[in-house]
């Protein structure tokens, strides 16, 4: 299977809404991802199999040296083939090219192996408030 990865790749809202619903197991929403990432993100990475969007990660930004990985997602039928790891690799490269110094992520405990072992994040204390 040939998967290609594109930093700030072109995608459609409906494709990303479908992928998000599949990856995070909820009904398909009608979010305006294009407006959201255009306004708030340093970049994002799309993974395409042929022309189908099969993976995505959003890289939010503080406008300075901090970037934040959000919404890493891979289609359920294509997991455990290294697509998630490659998405994050491209996110690291995009953030580094933009002169960011730190890439942050937070995640549920069951994804420790993915982010720490596969993607190279080091463990750090962090805090979170549900608003
Ligand atoms: C997390 C996610 C992006 C990983 O995508 P993926 O393409 O399957 O990941 P990779 O194939 O690169 O995984 C590399 C390794 O990370 C670990 N890993 C990946 N997904 C994992 C999971 N869900 N639970 C535990 N370990 C996982 C495994 O060690 C895996 O190696 P293996 O395939 O030999 O077991 C994907 O499972 C997903 O979309 N999950 C739902 C959305 C989500 O929760 N995103 C995270 C938001 S913080």
Image (cartoon, rainbow, N blue to C red):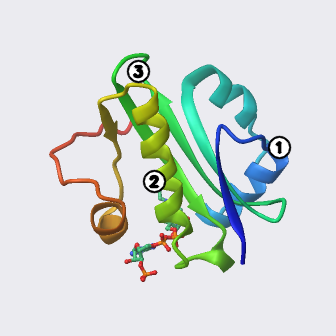
Figure check: 74 above or below 46? below
What's the residue at 22%, 39% (across, down)?
A: 127
Name the disc covering residue 12, or none. Answer: 1
| Marks 3 and 1 close (CB-CB < 8 Å) | no
Mark 2, mark 3: which one is toward the viewer? Answer: 2
Mark 1 / mark 2, whichever is N-terminal? 1
Residue 41 in the figure: left or right of residue 112: right
Q: Quadrant of the C terminus?
A: top left
Q: Is residue 106 above or below residue 101?
A: below
Of callouts 2 and 3, the N-terminal one: 3
Q: How would you rate the neighbour count of disc 3 (Cα within 10 Å): few for under 14, some for 14-19, many for 20 or more? A: few
N-term-proximal mark, 3 vs 1: 1
Alpha carbon of mark 3 to alpha carbon of mark 1: how far? 25 Å
Residue receiving disc 2: 89
| x, y percent for residue 105 | 35, 46
Question: x, y (%) of residue 106?
Answer: 34, 49
Q: Position of residue 17 (x, y in %)?
A: 75, 50
**As drawn, which residue projects farthest toward the left?**
125
Whether pointer 1 and pointer 2 mark residues with C-beta atoms closer than 8 Å, the reply is no
CA–CA distance between discs 2 and 3?
A: 20 Å
The answer for how far apart the CA atoms under marks 1 and 2 are is 23 Å
What kind of element bears circle 1?
loop
Q: Residue at x 81, y 52 (%)?
A: 15
Question: Taking the image as drawn, is residue 27 in sight?
Answer: no
Residue under numbered circle 3: 62
Disc 3 element: loop
Whether residue 39 is visible here, answered yes or no, is yes
């Amino acid at each position: 299977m040939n998967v290609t990865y594109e930093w700030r790749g072109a995608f459609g809202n409906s494709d990303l809404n479908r992928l998000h619903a599949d990856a995070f197991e909820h009904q398909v929403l009608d979010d305006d991802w294009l407006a959201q990432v255009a306004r708030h993100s340093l970049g994002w990475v799309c993974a395409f199999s042929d022309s189908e969007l099969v993976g995505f990660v959003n890289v939010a930004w503080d406008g300075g040296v901090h970037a934040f990985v959000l919404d890493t997602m891979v289609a359920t039928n294509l997991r455990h083939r290294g697509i998630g790891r490659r998405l994050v690799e491209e996110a690291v490269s995009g953030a580094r090219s933009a002169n960011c110094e730190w890439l942050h992520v937070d995640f549920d405990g069951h994804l420790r192996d993915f982010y720490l072992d596969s993607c190279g994040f080091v463990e750090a204390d962090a805090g979170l408030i549900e608003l």
